[in-house]
Amino acid sequence: MNDDTDNPPEPGQIAVLAACARPLDLPWLRNALDAALDHVNRPIRSVTVKVVDDVTMLELHERHRGEAVTTDVLTFDASDPGGPVEADIVVCVDEAARQAVELDHALERELLLYALHGVLHCAGFDDRTPEDFAAIHAEEDRILTAVGIGPIFRGRTT
């Protein structure tokens, strides 16, 4: 397990930590997220992304949202209203792996999508209505295209 939770990022930094046994290209994920964050419509103070498995995500989802199922991403927004983004984001490697196989792309690309999704929630986007859902995912694809990765979400309905 490559977990670095004892060394959280300093303010102004981006950290990507893995708390799962699956091998991941964490430097690529961190660098891609860092590049994407330059295109977010709010300044970024700090973002920590922790990659976990289904078991851990289910436990966190139940503890913090009252839902005893796994999910793709949980966002913990510590930002001051209107201030720079300061967030802890948890992403599920097992859900990302299922989606990556189904969509035939790299696991890290799917994890990047989840991390960016969490940041965009902190930057004022939501996804509860069909219009908001379309807007946040269009913004994800816009940002990922701007950094040379290209759209990952591409109009999924879930």
Image: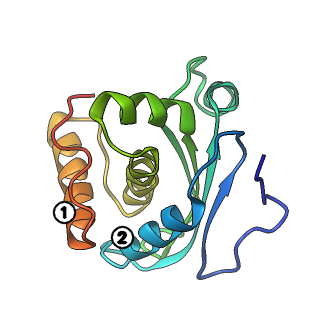
Task: Name which residue type carries label 1.
Answer: Arg
> Does residue 42 appear to the left or right of 29 in the view shown?
left
Q: Nearer the viewer, residue 33 or 106?
A: 106
Residue at image position (58%, 30%) is 65
Residue 65 vertical position relative to residue 16 in the rendered view, above or below: above
What residue is rendered at 31% in x and 54% in y?
A: 125
Name the foreground residue: 100 vs 142: 100
- Residue at the spot 46% in from the left edge and 54% down from the top edge: 115
Give the amino acid at mark 2. Ala
Which of the two discs, 1 and 2, labels the residue nearer the N terminus? 2
Q: Mark 2 — residue? A: 36
Quarter of the rendering occupied by the C terminus: top left
Left or right for 113, reference 9: left
Q: Which residue is mark 1?
A: 142
| Spot occupied by residue 1 in the image (x, y as percentages of width and height) | 78, 46
Q: Which element carries disc 1, helix, strand or loop? A: helix
- The quadrant holding residue 10 is bottom right
